[in-house]
Amino acid sequence: MEVTVKDHRITGIQVTESNISSDDFNLAVAQRVMDQQSLQVDTVSRTTISTRAFLKAVENALRP
C-alpha cells in the first residue's frame, strides 16, 4: 500500500499488492478514505474482513 499525503490530507491510495480483493473493491474503499479523510469508514457490504484488512494496510502505510 502506498499512501500519498499532501498538506496533511490523504490525496492518493495505491494498492501495490493484494490477494484479497478486486480492483473495484480497492477503489471503493480508497475513495471512502479520501472522501472522509479518515480510516473510520463504513465497511463495504459482505466484505467486512477485507475492508478491515485494507484499512489496516493504509494505517500501516501512514506510519513513519
Image: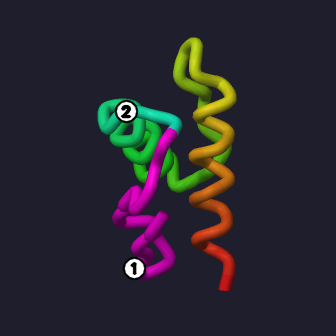
Which residue is the site of mark 1? Answer: 6
Residue 26 - label: none
- Residue that appears at 44% across and 57% down: 17
Q: Which residue is mark 2?
A: 22
Please tell me which residue is depicted at 58% across the width and 13% down the height of the picture: 46
Q: Nearer the viewer, mark 1 or mark 2?
A: 2
Answer with left or right where residue 62 lies relative to residue 13. right
Q: Write down the quadrant of residue 61 in the picture.
A: bottom right
Hey, what amino acid is under mark 1?
Lys
Q: Tell me which segment is drawn in magenta.
A: 1-19
* Nearer the observer, 21 or 29: 21
Residue 30 lies, in percent from the top left, at 42, 47
Which mark is first along the chain, 2 or 1?
A: 1
**What amino acid type is highlighted by mark number 2?**
Ser
Is residue 12 a member of the stretch shown in magenta? yes
How much space separates mark 1 and mark 2, taking CA atoms? 27 Å
Q: Residue at x 65, y 24 (%)?
A: 48
- Helix, strand or loop at mark 2: loop
Q: Is residue 3 left or right of residue 47?
A: left
Q: Is residue 55 magenta?
A: no
- Circle 2 crowding by C-alpha within 10 Å: few under 14, some 14–19, many from 20: few
